[in-house]
Image: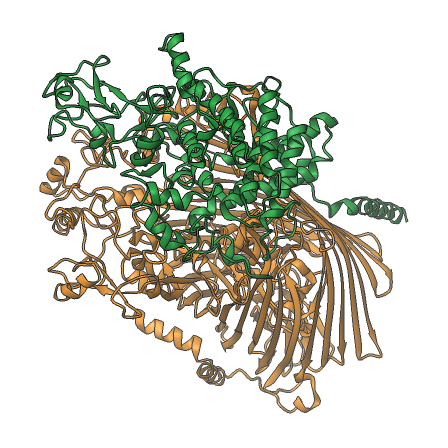
Amino acid sequence: MRYYKKIGYTYLITFLLIATGCSKLLQEQPRSQITPAFFSTPAGILGGIAGVYSDMRNLWGTEGFTNITLAGTDEYLAGGSASGTWFWTYNGLAAKTDDMDGLWGIAYQDINTLNGVLQFGAAAGLDSTTRNQYLAQAKFLRAFYYFYLVQTFGDVPLHLTFVTVPSQADTRTPIKDVYTQIIKDFTDASTQLSPTPTAPFLGKPATQAAALYFLAKMYLTRGWSSAAQSGDFQTAYNIANTLITNKATYGVDLWQDYNDANKPGNEYGKETLFVVDRESDLKYGERTTGSRASGAKENGTCFFFRPNYPTVNANYPASGGGPIMTRDIANGRPFIRIRPNVAYSMNVAFAERANDSRYDKTFQTTWIANTPNVTTPRGTLRIGIDTGIWMPGYEVTDAQRAAFTGVIFSPSNYTTVMFPSMKKYDDPNRADVNDASTRPFIFAKFSDVYLVAAEAAFKAGDNTNAAAMLNVVRQRAAYRTTNTPGQNAAAATAMVITPGQVTLDFILEERTRELYGECQRWWDLVRTHTLADRLSRYNPTEAYPGFVAGGQTGSTYNYTLRPVPFNIEISLITEGTPFLQNPGY
Amino acid sequence: MKIVVIQNIQRALLTSARLLRKLSLGFIIAGFFALPAFSQNVHLKGSVINENGSPVTGATVLVKGTTRGVSSDDKGVFDINVAPGDVLVVSSVGYTPLEVAVNGKKALRITLISSSNSLEQVIVVGYGTQKKKDITGSIVTVSAAALQETPSANLISELKGRAAGVDIVSNSSSPGASGQIRIRGNRSITSGTNSNSDAIDAPLLVVDGIPYGGSINDLNPDDIATLDILKDASATAIYGSRGSGGVIIITTKRGKPGKAVMGYNAYYGLSNATGEYKVFNGPQFAQLKLDAAAGNSINPGTNAYALTQAEQAGLANGTSTDWQKLIYKQGQTTDNELSLSGGTEMTQFSLSGGFYKETGIIPGQDFTRYSIRSTIDHRINSKLKIGLNTLNTVSFTDYGGNPVGGLVRLSPLVSPYNADGSVNKLPETGAIDGATVNPLSILYDANAILNNDRRLRTFNSLYGELEIIPNLKYRINIGLDYSQDQSGSYFGPNTFYNSSTALSGANESVANAEAYTYTIENVLTYDKTFLQKHRLTFTGLYSVQKDHYQSSGFSGSGIPADYIQNYNLTLANTITAPSGQSSFSERGLISYMARVNYAYDNRFLLTATIRTDGASVLSPGNQYFTYPAVAAGWNIANEKFMNNISFISLLKLRGGWGITSNQGINPYSTLGTLSTNFYNFGAGTAGQNIGYLVTNLANKNLKWESTSQTNIGLDFGLLKNRITGSIDIYDQRTKNILLPENLPASNGAQSTIVNAGKTKGHGIELNLSTINIQTKSGFTWSIDLNFTINREQIVQLQNPSVKANIGNLWFVGQPLNVIYDVKKIGIWQTKDAALAATYGEHPGQIRVQDVNNDGKIDASDAQIIGTYQPKWIGGITNRFTYKGFDLSVVIYARMGQTVAVPYLTSDGGANGFDFFNNSRNNQIKIDYWTPNNPTNNFPGPDASADKFIYASTLAYQDGSFIKMRSINLGYTISPKILSKAGISSLRVYVTAENPFILYSPLVKSGLALDPEGNGYSGGVTSAVTSSTPVSQRSITVNLNAPPVRQYNFGVNVRF
C-alpha cells in the first residue's frame, strides 16, 4: 500500500507539472531571431529607422540608380562604358522594367518597415519627446519614399499599415491621395523632428530643415502636377522662405565658397540638408576594400563621371608614347559611365565662366603628371609639377598646344571616353584607388532651398522674389578664394539677374549650374514637364528619338513615367483589379 | 555469370507467379507432410532453435489436437510425453509456427524460422500493441535477427532493402554514415536544404514509446529487439502531425523472467575501398594535355597548362603516381556488446554495454560509440507495474577532410617523394596549381588537421501502468532525452586541405549544440471481450512534448602554432561568429488521441482513431488540427466457407484511410523575422547602429501540410503458412504544401510561405516470405522478398495557373525530383561540321537535341530528361540452414532512377569539376572526342575552356543498381559441447558486406564507384535554363569517400 501512495503522489505531481506547463507550451518565445514586435522597444524603433537609412545605400550612390536619376536628360550623355543603355536612349526601355526593381522593391520594403515602426513604436517605452522624434524620423522616411515613388511611377499603391497578411492584390492610389499623405507626413516631421541633428541621429539625417525642404519641394511638385491645388506654389515658396529666414535656428546656411558645399570633409557641414551616410568603417560602412568587391551598398559616385585618362598617350593625337597618367587616388578610378552633354551643359548652362565660378568647381581641368619618364613630343613631364593633361574647356590655338608640354583636350577633342570629369564626388581619403567612396552621399543642399523657392515664386507669378532667390545662389557662385574682395564684389554684381530674366529655362539652367551631377535632373525635367522639349533641343540624337518612339503617339508625356517592374509587381498581382503598366511600356 | 545472376534476380523479383510455382514444386520434393501414426506414449526431449542456431526460449510445444503442451526453457529445451504418431505444433512469437511429426523419435531438434507474418505475433502499433491477426493498417515488422544479417553502425544502413515501401539511399560512405530514408516516397515539395527535406518527409522514429529525434547513430543496433514500421495513414494517424512520413517503432530488448542470461555479441571487420576513382595515368594525362592543345579553340595548338619540367621528366622516366592508392587505407570495424538480462516474475532487468569503432579508408575519418543501456520492469502488485529504460551513448566522430577531389586532380606525372626519399612537399611546383601541398601531409601532420564531433546522448523513458479496474489500464510514459554536441575543426597551413604557407592562414572553429526533449504521455486502455465474439479495445491519450535546441559556434583564422588547434580561439588572429551557427528554438506539442479497435468473431475488424495536435509553431487560432482515420479488416480465412480450402491458412483483407501531417514549419516562422544591416549616423562611433528591416513577411495563417492516404492490403498465408506475405496498394494526396510564393513587391516583401502545393502518390508493395525447403535432415531454405513501386507527382504549385517553376525544378504532372535540361544526343563529329556551325558549335563539342528544330538551342529546347525516383525497388534475402550452419544472402535493388555525377562536368563557376576536360588538372578517365576518336561519349578537350557548353548534360547517368548487400555465414556450435563450459549457445559467423555489385551501368562504365550516391545536390548550371538541374534534395554521386567492401568475423555467445 505504501507503493500505492508513493505512486499516487508521483502521478499527482506529474499532473500538476503538466497543468502548469501547458498554457505556456504553445506560446512561442523566439530568442535567436528578431521579430517585428522588436519595433515596440526603444532599440527596435531606432534599429528600424537605421535599417531604412542603411537600405537607402542600395540606391543613392550606386550605378544603376545613378543612371535612373541622370540618364536620358539634357545634361548628360552615355560615357564609353555606360551601363543601362536603354536609360540613355529610351530604346528597349519597355523590356527593362526589371531595372526599376531596386527603387520599387526597396521603397516598399522600407515603407513596410517604417509602417511597422510607426505601428509598434507607439508602444515603445520611450518618453514622449524621444518617441515623437523617433516616429517623426519614420514619417519623414516614409514620405521621402512615397515622394520619389510618385514622381517616378505616377499612381502607386499607398500602404500606411504594417502588412501582416500577404496579398496578391494591390491597386494604384491616385497621386492626389499619395501627395496628401506625403504632405501630412512631412508636415508632422517638420515639427516633430529635432531642428538640428541630435543623438542618436548624428551627422545629417532627417531634421526639421530637411523636412521643410522636402515639404516645400512636395508642394512645388504637386503644383506642377495634375493633382495641383490652388496655392501650392505659394505654399511651397512660403515654406522654403521660412526655412531660409530661420536658417540660424536650423543650423543651415550657404558656404561662402560654392566649392565648400561639395568638399570632402564638409558632408555634415552647414549647407548639407540630408545625406545617405557612408563611412570608412568596414562593418558600419558596409563596404569592402580593394576592388569594390561586394559593392551593392557602396558609394561609387567617385567612379562614374571619370573619363579614361590613363589611356591618353604621350604622342596624342598621334599614337604611341605610352600613357601620360597612371590611375591614382587623386584622379580616381575611371568608370567612363557618364559624360557631360557638351551642347547643353558646357555650351549653355556653364557657358559663362568668368564671373560664375561653378564651372571650375564642378569639373576637373588639370591632371598633374604622376608617371615617371613620360615624354611628349614637346618635352618630359615632371611628376607633381607639370600638367599632364589639360582640359581648358575652350578651343586653343596650335601655338598654345605647341607651347604646352602635356596634352590639351579642348572641346573639339572630347570623345565618349575623354570628356570633362565631374569632381564633386572625389574622395581623396580612400586607401586604394579601387575603393568606393567613403563619403556620405549628399542628398540635398541648402542652396536648393533657394532654387525651390525661386521656382515656386516664378510659378506663383512672383518673378521679383524668384529673381531674389536665384540671386542669392548666383552671387555666392561668384566668390573665388583667389579673387580680391573687389574682384569678388564685381563678379557678384555681374551675376545679378533681373525679375524679367527669370524664365523656366533659366531656372532649369541655374539648377544645372548649382546641382550638376547631384542625381535630381530626370525628376526636375519630369516635374517641370520639360523633358520632351529639352531632349528635342539638347539631346536630339542619343535620347530624343527613342523617347518619342517609345511613348504614346502625340503625347507630351512620352516616357515621363518609369515602368512599374513587371516581374516583381505587375505579373504577381493575380487577384482583384489588374495592375496596369504605365503608358508606353 | 553476372548477367545470368542478374537475369535470375530480375525474373525472381518480377514474376512472382512463376516463383510460386517453383516453390510449390519444392514443397513436394521436400516431402514435408507428416504421416499419421499410432499412439503409444513415450518421453520426448527436444530443443527449439532458430535459423541462426540460437535457442528459442519460451516456445510453446503443443501436441496437435490436444491441449497438452509445454514451453521450452532458456536453453530452448523441452520435455513432453507424446505418442509416436503425434504431431507437435511448435510456436513462438516472431516465428512461423511449425508442425513436426514425432515419428517415434525420442529426441528432436526443431528449427523455427523467424517470420514477420505470424498471426499471434504482437505488433507495437503506437500507444499499445495488437496481435498481428487484428491489425488493419499496413505495418511491416523487421526482427533483430534480420537486422543482424547486415551489421552496421546504425539502423538505417541495416534496413536497406529489408522492407517493402521503405526506401533508403546512402548519402555518404564515411564512417557512421546513415542515409536518406523515405517510407512511401516524398510528399512535400521542398526547396531548401537536404536536412530540411529530411525533416519533412522522413519517418518519425519512436523508441519504446517515446518519439526519438536526433542522430540515428545514437542507437546501438544491438539493443534493438524489433522494428515495426507503420506505413499507411490509418496506422500513423495516431501520430497526427508527425505521421505522414510513416513511423518506425523501435522496441529495445528487455529482460525476461528466468535465470540470468549473459550475452556477448561481437564482430571485427576489415574494410577496403571497392575501388579507386579511375583517372588518367601518366602517359594518358600527357596525351590529354596534347589533345587539349590540339583542341584549343582560341589559340589552336597551344596549352597554357603544358607539362612542367618535372612532369616531362616524369613522363620520360615512366612516373605514373597513383595518388589515391597512397592515401586510401584499410578500415577496421569492431563491435562489442556485453549484456545481462533476467529477472523474477516480479522484476525483470537487462543491462548492456557496447563499444563500436569504425575507422574509414580515408585517414582521419572514424566513428566511435560507447553505449550503456539498462531496463527494469517491476510489478509492484497485481495492479501496478513500473519500468525504466535508459539508453546512453557517447560517440566520437572524426570527419577528417575529403581528399578525394584533390587526389583525382593531382598530376600522375610527378612523384610523391623526392630522390632522397623525403616527401615532395609541393609536387606540382611549376604548374599553375603549384601551391597544392602533397596529400601525404594528411598522414604525417597529425596536429594540422582536426575535424570532429563529440556527442553525448541520454534517452530515458519511465512508465507506470495501473490496472484501475479489470480491463481498464492507465499508463504514464515519461520521456527525457538530452543530447549535447561539441564539434570543432582545425586546418593548419602547409597541408593538402589548406595550402596557405603561414600559420596566419590556419582556420579553426568550435561549435556547441544541445538539445533536450521531454514527453509526458497519459494512456488509458480499455480492453474487453463481450459475449465471446465482440472484442473491444479503447485507447485514449493525452500527451505533451517540448523540444529545445540551442547552438553556438565561432570560427577563427590564424593561430600561433598548429598544436593549439581549436583549443583556444582567443589566440586566433581574427574570430568571427558565422551566421547560422548560433541558434535557439523550442517547440511544444499538445495532443489528444482516441482509438477504438473492434473485432467481431475474429473475422471482422474495425479501427477508428482521431487525434488532435496543438502546436506552438503555428499562430494562435490555427494551432490545433485534427487527424481522423478509419480502417477495417476481414479475416476471410476464418469464415466457414474457407474451412475446406486447406491450402489457405491466412487470408485477410484490410482497407484504411486517414489524414496525417508533417511538421514542416519551423518554430517562429509565423512571427516573421527582421533582417539586419548596419548604418552610421555621422562619422563617429556614437552614430553606429545595427539596423533592422522587414524583408520577409510572416504568414500567420500557416498550417500543416496534410496527407490523406487510402490503403488496401491483403495478407495471406498458404500451405500452413509456408508461404506468407502481404500486398498493399495505396494512394496518397497531400495538400497545403508549404511553398514560397512571390508577392507583389508593394507588400513590402517579395515572398512569403503559403500553404498551396499539392502532390499525389500511389504505389504497390509486396512482402513475401516462403519456406522453400525444410527437410528432416535439418536443411531449410527460406526467402524473404520485398518489392516496391512508388510514384510521386506534383499536382499543383502555388496556384492552378502555375504549371512549372524551372528555377526549383517543379513541374506539375511530374515527379517531385526531376532533371530538366537540354538532352545530349552525342558529340558533333567532323562530318557534321557544317551543321554544327549553324548552332555556333564545332566538331568535338556536345551535341544536344534541338527539340523544336528552330536551328538554335535555347531554353525552349529544355526537357525533362530524368527523375531521381526509382521505377522500382526490391530486396531479397535467401536463408539456408543445415546442421548448425546458417547462410543468409541479402540482395538489394533500386532500378530506373537517374543520378547526377557533377564531377563529369563543369560550368566555369563554382559547380562541377573545375577545369574539367581542359587538362589543367587530372580528372576521371573519360572517353573523350578527338578527330581520331569520333566517340559520342565526352567532348574533345580544350585547353582554353574553363567550361563546356551544355556540359551539365554529361552529369546525368543511369543510377540503377542491384547490389549484393551482404552474405552472412554462421555456425552454431552444438549446445552439448558447450554446456560443460557453461555456455548455452555459441554462434560464430563471417559476413561479407557489399561484396560485389550485380548490376550497375554507371559502375560498369568506370565513371563512378557507387551508383547509390554519396552527397546531396551539387549539380552544375545548365547553359539554357540558367538554373541548376539538380534539386537541393537530390542525392548525387560526388567525389567523396569511395564505398567500402567489408569482411566481418563475429561471435554471438550466451551464458
Q: Position of residue B1052 (x, y in %)?
A: 53, 54
Most extreme residue toward the front, as rendered?
A500
Q: Is residue B375 left or right of residue B953?
A: right
Q: Quadrant of residue A211?
A: top right
Quick one: B954 or A568, which is closer to the camera? A568
* Side of B107 relative to B237 (left or right): left
Looking at the image, which is closer to me, A89 or B635? A89
Residue at image location 22% in from the left, 50% down from the top: B917
Asked whether residue B582 appears in the rendered view, the answer is no
Q: Residue at x 65, y 57 (%)?
A: B703
Instruction: Say which colour chain B has.
Output: orange
Q: Image point 53% across, 22% down: which residue?
A: B682
Whether residue A335 is visible, yes or no, is yes
- Of B619 and B371, which appears nearest the observer? B619
Residue B350 in the image: state x and y as whole percent: 66, 50
The vertical placement of B403 against B715, above or below, is: above
Q: Which chain is green?
A: A
Nearest the camera: B145 or A451? A451
Quadrant for residue B126, please give it: bottom right
Quarter that holds the N terminus of chain B:
bottom left
Name above or below for residue A30 compared with residue B348.
Answer: above
Q: How many numbered markers are drawn?
A: 0
